[in-house]
Image (cartoon, grey):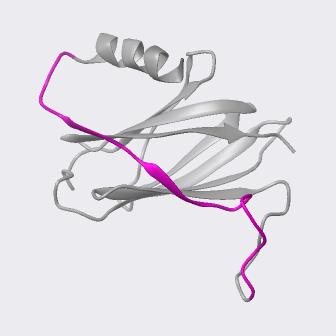
Amino acid sequence: MLMVAFDAWAAERRGPNLVQRLVASLTFDGFAGPAVAGARGGATGTDRQLLFGTDVADVAFHILPGKAGTMVLDGQVLLVDDEADADADVALVAVDDGGEVSAVVATDVEGQFRLEGIAAGSYLMRIDLGNVQLDVGPFEVTSP
């Protein structure tokens, strides 16, 4: 459902072009198990760390409580391969489980981004790296 809704939104936004599209796989979930001995922090029940990866880029998310029962999604896109256009403006689009675009944000020069006011739900992120698109998720955002 999320992929269909996102594909419809993306088709309206862009015409056809030759873009490599990759699906990122979840490589770490802070809620998946106990904290590693000696590691900072750990799953507290209110924050969560997720790491998704591909051969082109890794995407780190830190989900934490925000204002008025919403959540904040901090993160960074880390390029690991020259296939992605390092000079491209990196844009992230969040689509909720109802198929609505809930947020659009660009990264800074270091690949960092911040989305505030995110409601609890299931999200799919599409990250535009110029000539490469990464699909991340779906993943759950839960409120405290």
Q: Is residue 32 magenta?
A: yes
Give the extent of the magenta segment.
15-37
Location of residue 96 with respect to 115 vertically, above or below: above
Location of residue 67 with respect to 62 vertically, above or below: above
Q: Locate residue 108, reporting x and y percent.
A: 40, 53
Outermost residue, bottom direction?
38
Q: Locate residue 122, reporting x and y percent.
A: 65, 31
Q: Is 39 on the left-hand or right-hand side of 88?
A: right
Outermost residue, left direction?
18
Q: Locate residue 125, reporting x and y percent.
A: 48, 36
Q: Is residue 42 magenta?
A: no
Prevailing secondary structure class for the magenta stretch in the rendered image: loop
**Who's the residue at 16% across and 18% down the image?**
16
**Who's the residue at 85% across and 36% down the image?**
69
Q: Quadrant of residue 91?
A: top left
Q: Quadrant of residue 100?
A: top right
66 or 25, nearer to the observer:
25
The C terminus appears in which quarter of the rendering? top right
80 or 31, nearer to the observer:
31
Number of marks present in the image shown: 0
Location of residue 34 with respect to 92 vertically, above or below: below
Q: Is 107 on the left-hand or right-hand side of 45?
A: left
Location of residue 72 with respect to 111 vertically, above or below: above
Q: Is 56 on the left-hand or right-hand side of 7?
A: left
Q: Quadrant of residue 31?
A: bottom right
The N terminus appears in which quarter of the rendering? top right
**Who's the residue at 78% across and 36% down the image?**
70
